[in-house]
Image: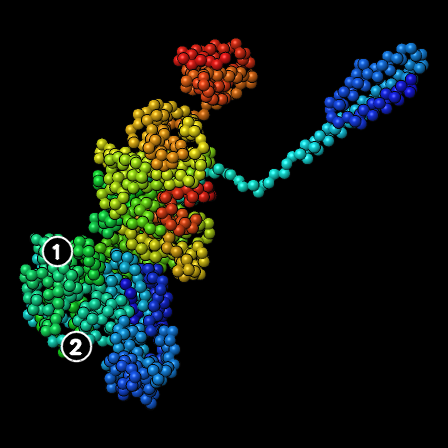
Amino acid sequence: MFLSMNWISDFVDFEGLDKLELIRRFSLSTAEVENEIFFKGSDISGIVVAEIKSVEDHPESKKLHLLKVDAGDGQLTDVVCGAPNVRVGMKTAFAKIGAKIGEIDITPRALAGYTSYGMCCSEKEVGISDDNSGIMDIRENVANGTDIKDLYQVEDIVFEVDNKSLTNRPDLWGHYGIAREFAAIAGRPLKPLETVDLSEYDGLKKIDMKIEDSLCQRYSCLQVENITENVSPVNMKIRLFYCGMRSINLLADLTNYLMLEMGQPMHAFDSRKVEKLRIKRFDEPFTFTTLDGAERNIDENTLMICNGDIPVAIAGIMGGLDSEIVEDTTTLTLESATFDAVSIRKSTVRLGHRTDASMRYEKCLDPELTVLAIARFVKLLQDIDSGVEVVSSLTDERAFEYDQINLTFNKNFVDRYTGIEIDNETIVKTLTSLGFGVELSGEDFSVSVPSWRATKDVTMKADIIEEITRIYGYDNFDIHTTATPLYPVRPAAEKTVEDRIKDILVKRFSLHEVHSYVWAYYDEYKALGIEIEDNVKLMNATNPNIEVIRKSIIPTQLCQLKMNNTFAADYGIFEVGRVVEGYREDGLCNERKKLAVSLFSKTKSVEALYFELRDILLTLAADIKHLPLTFKTAEAAHGYEHPKNLNTIICDGKKLGKIGLVYPTVLKKIDKKANIVWAEIDVTDFALIEADSIKYEEPSKFPGIEIDLSFVSSKFAPIGEAVKNANCSLIKGIDVVDTYEDENGKSITSRIYFAHPEKTLTKEEVMDVVNGIIAELEGKGIALKK
Amino acid sequence: MESKISLVRDEFLAELTKAENSADLEAIRVKYLGKKGPVTELMKGMKDLSNEEKKAFGQKVNELKAELTEKLAEKTAFLKEQEILREIESTPDFDISMPANLGEGSYHPVTLVQRQCEQIFKSMGFAVEDYAEIVSDYECFEALNIPKHHPARDMQDTYYLDNGQLLKSHTSAAQNAIYKKYKDALINDGVPIKAIFPGRCFRNEATDACHENTFFQMEGVMVDKDISISNLIYFMKTMLSEVFQKDLKVRLRPGFFPFVEPGFELDISCLICGGDGCPSCKHSGWLELCPCGMIHPEVLKAGGIDPEEYTGFAFGLGLTRLVMMKYGIKDIRDLNSGNLKTLTQFTDDE
């Protein structure tokens, strides 16, 4: 919304104050002002009123005219002018030699063989409208030579406030409400609006009007006749133009002017078309043509203004084509109403049509504005066209009542909330200047909220704090820290575990953390041939490519591996993210936090990669929980899972997730030459496992023994399991020393460490245990290599 | 006899000069000082001499033995030194400017900035909370005093799920649960509520370089008996100065958010020009950074806290935006792209 300082100055006397500083303070106290401030009229100078004394056609040009103009300097000036509307006796805006229009300096200029000593200007050239069809036709009877800036309010400071900053302030959708803020900020009084006294017309006939639906909160109307003037005063047009509106005709301009001044939308009907004003909804949908010529679908929820049963306007949004003012209109019915804000907003969304009026109605307008706006409208109209007659009494109906909001609080409340000392006098003065009624008794305040702030904006004590503090100025606050007692803060276990997982994966295993989306992307999955499994769905995604929430991070991670398949020959990625595993019993989403890890390699065997990932998982469990993991063969349940080597990961008896390979067809689509292994575990479940404590054991002072055992068989011997089964306290560790494959099968050499806490072990003392291990493996058909 | 001694010495010295390594020296030692060597022979030849002569000659032979032993030791030491020098000489010169391979892993940049922020808050006694991504209408709106017809609820902004839940559109959705979690300690034991909750948020909108449907925020709240606007400004200034590691100016403007009253838009002095005005702050000297405000009494009430007795402030930091500001990332979509060319650059950052 554009705001004119001239307009605001109609209501507040800024004499002696810096307007730019006031605008800056408005930005800090009320609503953000956009950076660019427009200094209207500052780019023109030397443009005066001049009268055309003679017009001759240019001998060689059809367009050009040769003029002699009187610019009030006691001589006639030769001007070459191309405007079509030149005529003798016309007064226009004339840029003299030495004048400036934007970047242009006016100098004597040769045009088609003649020299022009100055330029006649259009409204666009003066900068007061976008009309460039001809030169200005000045109707005011002023002396030639009068500076255009003295004649009209060409100079103005215009600033912009983003509409979004005003959504909660229905009172700021017009200059008068803005002026109230400026008055409070500047500490100057706000002048009352000049209006007519509508009670003068109480004796006249009432308009036949009835609110038949409480979505219309108040409807006020009045009939006027005998309007002879059709063109708006130039200063009014300039204000409208500076505020972003185009001048149409006097009546349309006046309703717009009223809306920009008071925030109250108004509408003028041809009285012949609204003899029986009814405000209601229809049971059946129908189409309706609005005054912009568009045909719109009206449904049973849309409030309409009707003439009996014939709709004539969409309430609060736009008038109808058939009830518009036309050339032979003699009597006007002025509408000034308040409608239910939510209903208007919903209708706007349904119709896909937002207007300056509906934008204001959506904000919960002050219902007390309707009559005031009519009184103001008549006053402005009469000032412009003194022959106007009011031909009805004010007809005004309310469909709802609201309570006056009164708030009470004491000084201590203000002190606690602000944390600073703002004295009673300042509080009273601030609230009064904003239109609040204030009574102070001792330290107790009683505040009545004015109607223009009471529709939704100010309803409780905390709202009053905002009024006091914003005008006081947050820049003026003395700031200080809190005085709160100290208590220990315990970190959330899951958060700590998540952080440690990330540190281990990044710092120790050089993996790369990635993020991805919580839903499946159809096209990415399709490219890999991964089926999207049924799961919780988005109801309203604007992107047609997404709908289903993912059950696992692994498919998204496979998509990321494909995207990165040329990044490096070997790399690994991980993500800690959310998935949804269907619905819980109570119908809510079973949201889980997962860790997904994938390793990609073009150099390593799939087996080496698999054990690399297994060891990463073991490290996480050992480091974070001091616990081992066990693995149990699992059945493939998803299309991307390879049926072989799929294992459930178990820690402390809990199933945490799976480790596996990628199904060959999917793998080939990611990369024909790479190996990939993946694992996914539930971070919450993992975090909930109680960590084992570190059990310190004093290292033996006596030399231990190392026994190397080699086995060969068709598969690598499960030596680790056999050693564990031996359940011998003397065994302190086991390492795999070597593995290889040849025509005899798979060979594994492992080294078992023995130590005794109190003596030096001899080989004989451990041979029983060793033989037991050998026997167990031989029992499975695995031979010891001699 | 004398001539024999001198002959042995000369021969010994001649051979010693030729010796090139420890094996040569050992051979010389065995040859001259061994049991069958000339020195032993000379000793043995003394048996035919008179006692007088024995004494004089024996001394000479002993002197010879001592001399040979010493020369041998000298040569041994010399050769050892030569060997070390040769080893040093043969050590190659490395090219320290060779391309390196650090094999470093990397964190997601959001993790890095989130951790930095968490660290700052932890140092000020805030608990770091984690919260779900899927929440109820109550958590996301109702409990935050966002009435049924508020535009923020419109279908076009929020992702709704088929079971009536929704993807949280702001981290404020966790506020209600945080209040309920800590209110007993506040009310019974006077422990102030101080918590931050970083998290992922979702908005149903088209994406471009500046807009993402999935992004991170970090919400913070503090509730106690007398938390004031003055405290809020102090806290935001201190906290943001830590985040950006410079003494910032902050500026509050009124801003409307249903869950705070009064609500503010907080600006910080421009990080580039410090407030003088430059193209990056559109010559205003200020950057709009985060919304904040005093927690709305209805929001406290919904969390089981009496607004007559307690007050508090809340703020919402755009973590994703901070990440983009900090590292100069121009396209917000890079963050969720999984593109390792982008992401692997963020090895660690404190």
Relative to residue B33, is residue A689 depicted above or below? below
- What is the quadrant of the N terminus of chain B in the image? top right
Real-space Cα distance between discs 1 and 2?
A: 36 Å
Q: Secondary structure at mark 2?
A: loop
Of B92 and A372, which appears nearest the observer?
B92
Residue at horizontal 37 percent and vertical 82 percent from the top: A109
Relative to residue A741, is residue B94 depicted above or below? below
C-beta proximity under 8 Å, tags 1 and 2: no
Label 1 Cα crowd, 10 Å radius (few <14 / some 14-19 / many 20+): many
Q: Chain of mark 2?
A: A
Amino acid type shown at disc 2? Glu
Of B171 and A662, which appears nearest the observer?
A662
Residue A18, image quadrant: bottom left
Residue A310 falls left or right of residue B45: left
Rendered location of residue A330, percent (x, y): 10, 73
User: Residue A229: which disc?
Assistant: 2
Residue A42, image quadrant: bottom left
Q: Is residue A504 visible?
A: no
Residue at horizontal 39 percent and vertical 25 percent from the top: A629
Of B141 and A614, which appears nearest the observer?
A614
Residue B194, image quadrant: top left
Residue at horizontal 29 percent and vertical 37 percent from the top: A550
Amino acid type shown at disc 1? Ile
Q: How many numbered marks, from 0 up?
A: 2
Residue B19 falls left or right of residue A148: right
Q: Which residue is mark 1?
A: A298
Relative to residue A261, is residue A383 depicted above or below? below
